[in-house]
Image (cartoon, rainbow, N blue to C red):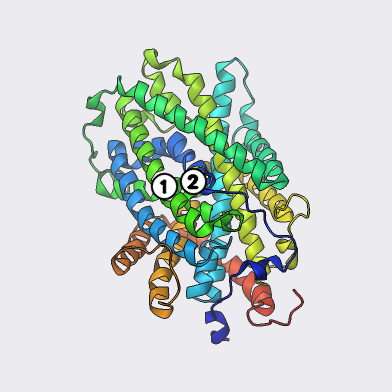
Amino acid sequence: MLKQLLARKTNFSDVVDDSHGPGLRRTLGPWGITALGIGAVIGTGIFVVTGTAAAEHAGPAVLISFVLAAICSAFSALCYAEFATLIPVSGSSYSYAYATLGELVAWFIGWNMVLEYGISASAVAASWTGYFTSLLDHVGIHLPVALTEAPLAFTGGHLVATGHLLNLPAVAIVLALTWLCYVGIRESSGLNALMVLLKVGLILMIIIAGARYVNTDNWHPFIPEPKGDGEFGWSGIFRGAAMVFFAYIGFEATSTAAQECKNPQRDLPFGIILSLVLCTLLYLGMAAVMTGLVPYTVLNTVDPVVTALQGHAELGWLRTWVEVGALIGLSSVILVMIIAQPRIFMIMARDGLLPKVFAKVHPKHRTPHINTLITGFGIAVLAAIFPLDLLADLTSMGTLIAFTAVCAGVLILRYTAPELPRTFRVPWAPVICVAGVLSCLGLLYTMNWFNWALMGAWTVIGLLIYFGYGMRHSHLHAPKIDQ
């Protein structure tokens, strides 16, 4: 049994994957992959989480939080880039773990990626509602609070009922984007590229216009005096880093589109690294302007960018642009997450770890259509009933666990298979890989007990599915199973 749990997959060819039916359509070039990464990264991190992290944890030093999260992400991004040249299939860190750490760890990582992508899209959809209702309020339309707020809230370390019905706008945007992803990767990636151009242009507009009105007194003290564990001071900076880490997960989503790349060995490393660099610069610029326009203590709102602008009448003209741009930016994040998650299901099913229905590709649209529908409806349900802060922390945990496995996997493969051709190699691999593992574990350490409890429950559910189905149907151990 132990041998099976530790068995590694070595054949990741397209021939094996396409034997299950129609293959995915290769339509993405290097800039399309970069746009997917930026589309997934630039969203809730800038438009919502920045305000929460500054107001509750780090103050103006949220800039340091972003730098720490970026460094942690950079270690992982380099490792993802090397793996992408070795294993150019849609499984991302699940496939990378399968090649290096064995089937059980691969299942654990894949199961956490369900958490990562599904819940992150739900969190972004929940924050999308804040800007949507703000825009409607701006034009005199007011939706009932009962239909725009989650029926549950995370307070004092536990969930409480709010008396609201559901977050209806979040459900609507998720279902609309699910339909687009069902239709095809060409259509959804084209729309994503357009949304990326619009939201990057808007963010640059806010940074340039807002910089003129920054009051540097708002940056003092840069690191507020600590009030408790994870509340300001250096512990708050690290807690803020763990929270804003949620903002960086998008670069990983690019690797789930490997089988839709024209040249994955070249395009994936390019897209992964470039999207991370560009997004980090935009995050730092926006965080500096927001905390400079108003005191950080007022930024804990559903639309903190609007809150920052409202502190200066001269910037009032930007409000509508911010609201529209935020809706576009957040929509592109949801879109990329809905693209990514079905492909993880697909590759796991093609390994036999999930039922064969999850491996199906639509004969006309060439998308994992059943997975897309399951993913979309699941995300809609989570966005309808759970609050943003809980969803964001769970997403960060799932991502950090996946990143830890990838950083360890690169180093392991350097010793177990040094002969494999690598068109991109992590420089100073022992240092970078170990630093990546330690930095991810350090951020995980800052998470509170309630998130760990939920992660534990999620893991137990995953293990029950693996031992109840996946282990017995794995193609790696039962090659004669009808595929």
Instruction: Please tell me how many numbered marks the rendered image carries.
Output: 2
* Res 478 → quadrant: bottom right
Marks 2 and 1: in contact by CB < 8 Å? yes
Pointer 1 residue? 274
203 to 343, vertically: above or below: above
Q: Quadrant of the N terminus?
A: bottom right
- Judged from the image, the secondary structure of the residue bearing numbered disc 2 is helix
Tell me which label, 1 or 2, sits earlier in the chain. Answer: 2
Q: Position of residue 466 (x, y in %)?
A: 63, 72
Q: Name the residue: 44% across, 65% down.
A: 406
Q: Position of residue 79 (x, y in %)?
A: 41, 62
Report crowding for label 2: few under 14, some 14 to 19, many 20 or more residues within 10 A (C-alpha).
many
Pointer 2 residue? 34
Q: Name the residue: 56% across, 52% down.
A: 117
Residue 24 showing in the rendered view:
yes
19 to 451, vertically: above or below: below
Disc 1 residue type? Leu
Closer-to-camera residue (120/59): 120
Closer-to-camera residue (420/184): 420
